[in-house]
Image (spheres, coloured by chain):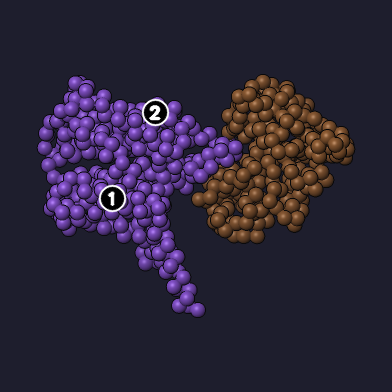
């Protein structure tokens, strides 16, 4: 049984079809990339899967159970957590408190939540004190912090929305290693990414969206030479 | 035996401050025995109590509710009506008033929590106005004339006394218990959830926080406490009418003490209440009784604060603390 199964999903905003009849499956333990030009509907798809937008048609099945149009917090409880394209950190809290909020998803006691948060804090290696204020963090550090906060909620599937955007090469390398480590710990990853150098070597499979439709789905090496994909990215004359 | 100096040595300056503040409040009524001196501090404690209750929803959970007079009035009216018409003990009436206010807060919170920012504030203002207009025209609750509670003299069970002295202790105990409760909540899971919802509601949802439910809980507790303050007020004055317990003015004052003092901190509402009481006493002494002048000045302070110090007087204290620390490190170097 696939971990996530999306069936004939359609999302419309008025006359605009952001996701059209999309179907795919994600197997446990995979890293799956979701790519496509700007406006292809990648973030919308994430929003529908995680309950931030309601689907007009179609179904989302997680572990075989229908989770279509549940509220985001209920979907998190089932085991799907996402990050945001624009970092959303609780800026009135310290680094550790930010992670603690996520840990409360599984633990009620502040002491236990703090202990679990400290473990996740070690994993992301920010190189700062856990009591640091958010305003003192670099952009890359905020991205990592957001990742740590999702990890402590205990997800089975992690949806990352352009985590590499705005990072330099060293930071991309660090992030890539971190994501492999997370995958090896048993968490499945579904990643929207614009940085091809990052996603192509990392992903086991890549799904390509174009104008709201799925145009390719396969190994990165296959997708890279797929004519429809090259056309979508580079224009017709290159195909 | 516990060595007290050693114990104090272990406490942080903040806790020593709390301790001194509590001791001052305990000693005060034995030193300043005049009724007016007691009345001033009762007022200070009542506004601290109300501001702290608002702080739960407005400060920690970050939802700018501006209709808390409705809950204050519901508390005052429920206990008074139950006592006058059904002979129910005002202490019991106080709890029932709290529950009614909480119940109403959930009914108003459910639809209006879908609104964010200024729209939520507007919805709460409109709701409080509806309650005021209703009570103003409802003959059963005395309409615009209001309600007089019968005088029994000194009676703890009837919650009324001839002197302000017992009232002082009642509101003091309410206030201390409430601060303890809010402090405990702020350090627990729900306190973290409220702060998360205040900063980034979408991110909070995404990591498993039922934002609507947690905001409703904040509103529930906040309304309950404010209603208790309402009963205290009606027992203190033995007279209530919509003009005194249901007006917009009161809603704004409740929010203001917390905002000016520093929302989302335990000390904020207390500092704000202190500032408001001192300011209004000072203005009354210097300018005579120009009604509402202290509110005008308070509003000006609020505008200036919102621009330069949106986190209130607590932020100024924080700046002061880091300035002193810098001076110390300069002196040490």
In the picture, measured across the screen, residue A229 lies left or right of residue B304, that is right
Find chain A in the image and tell me its colour. brown
Residue at label 1?
A: B298
Q: Residues within 10 Å of mark 1 (few under 14, many from 20)?
A: many
Q: Chain of mark 1?
A: B
Q: Residues within 10 Å of mark 2 (few under 14, many from 20)?
A: some
Q: Residue A45 at x, y = what percent?
A: 68, 31
Give the number of callouts: 2
The residues bearing labels 2 and 1 have C-alpha atoms spaced at a distance of 29 Å
Q: Residue A38 at x, y = what percent?
A: 71, 38
Which quadrant would the N terminus of chain B be assigned to in this image?
bottom left
In the picture, measured across the screen, residue B178 lies left or right of residue A234, that is left
Q: Is residue B86 above or below residue B207?
A: above
Inspect this view and state whether residue A218 appears. Answer: no
Q: Which mark is residue B108?
A: 2
Q: Which of the two residues, A152 or A157, is positioned nearer the viewer here?
A: A157
Q: Residue B96 at x, y = what percent?
A: 30, 29
């Amino acid at each position: 049984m696939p971990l996530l199964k999306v069936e004939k999903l359609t999302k419309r905003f008025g006359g605009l079809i952001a996701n059209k009849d999309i179907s795919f499956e994600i197997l446990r333990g995979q890293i799956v990339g979701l790519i496509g030009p700007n406006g292809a509907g990648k973030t919308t798809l994430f929003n529908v899967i995680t309950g931030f937008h309601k689907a007009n048609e179609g179904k989302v099945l997680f572990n075989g159970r229908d989770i279509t149009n549940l509220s985001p917090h209920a979907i998190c409880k089932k085991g799907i957590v996402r990050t945001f394209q624009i970092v959303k950190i609780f800026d009135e809290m310290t680094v550790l408190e930010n992670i603690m909020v996520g840990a409360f998803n599984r633990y009620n006691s502040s002491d236990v939540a703090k202990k679990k948060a400290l473990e996740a804090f070690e994993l992301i290696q920010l190189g700062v004190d856990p009591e640091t204020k958010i305003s003192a963090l670099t952009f890359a550090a905020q991205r990592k912090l957001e990742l740590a906060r999702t990890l402590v909620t205990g997800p089975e599937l992690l949806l990352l929305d352009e985590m590499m955007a705005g990072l330099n090469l060293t930071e991309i390398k660090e992030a890539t290693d971190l994501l492999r480590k997370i995958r090896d710990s048993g968490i499945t990853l579904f990643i929207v990414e614009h940085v091809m150098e990052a996603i192509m070597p990392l992903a086991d499979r890549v799904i390509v969206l174009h104008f709201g439709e799925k145009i390719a789905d396969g190994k990165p090496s296959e997708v890279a030479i797929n004519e429809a994909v090259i056309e979508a990215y580079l224009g017709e004359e290159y195909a | 035996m516990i060595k007290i100096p050693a114990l104090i040595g272990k406490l942080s300056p903040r806790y020593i401050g709390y301790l001194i503040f509590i001791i001052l409040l305990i000693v005060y009524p034995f030193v300043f025995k005049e009724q007016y001196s007691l009345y001033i501090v009762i007022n200070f404690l009542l506004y601290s109590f109300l501001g702290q209750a608002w702080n739960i929803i407005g400060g920690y959970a970050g939802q700018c509710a501006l209709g808390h007079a409705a809950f204050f009035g519901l508390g005052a009216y429920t206990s008074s009506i139950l006592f006058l018409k059904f002979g129910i003990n005002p202490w019991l009436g106080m709890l029932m008033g709290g529950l009614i206010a909480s119940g109403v807060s959930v009914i108003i919170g459910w639809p209006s929590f879908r609104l964010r920012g200024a729209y939520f504030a507007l919805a709460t203002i409109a709701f409080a106005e509806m309650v005021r207009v209703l009570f103003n025209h409802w003959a059963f609750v005395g309409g615009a004339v209001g309600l007089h509670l019968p005088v029994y003299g000194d009676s703890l069970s009837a919650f009324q006394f001839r002197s302000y002295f017992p009232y002082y202790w009642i509101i003091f105990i309410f206030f201390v218990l409430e601060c303890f409760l809010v402090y405990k909540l702020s350090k627990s899971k729900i306190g973290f959830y409220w702060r998360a919802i205040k900063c980034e509601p979408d991110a909070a949802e995404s990591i498993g926080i039922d934002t609507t439910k947690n905001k409703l809980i904040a509103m529930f507790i906040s309304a309950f406490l404010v209603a208790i303050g309402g009963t205290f007020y009606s027992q203190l004055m033995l007279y209530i009418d919509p003009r005194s317990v249901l007006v917009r003015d009161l809603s704004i004052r409740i929010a203001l003490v917390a905002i000016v003092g520093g929302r989302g901190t335990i000390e904020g509402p207390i500092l704000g209440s202190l500032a408001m009481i001192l300011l209004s006493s000072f203005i009354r002494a210097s300018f005579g009784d120009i009604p509402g002048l202290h509110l005008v000045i308070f509003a000006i302070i609020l505008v200036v604060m919102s621009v330069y110090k949106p986190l209130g007087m607590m932020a100024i204290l924080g700046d002061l603390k880091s300035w002193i620390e810098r001076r110390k490190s300069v002196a040490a170097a």
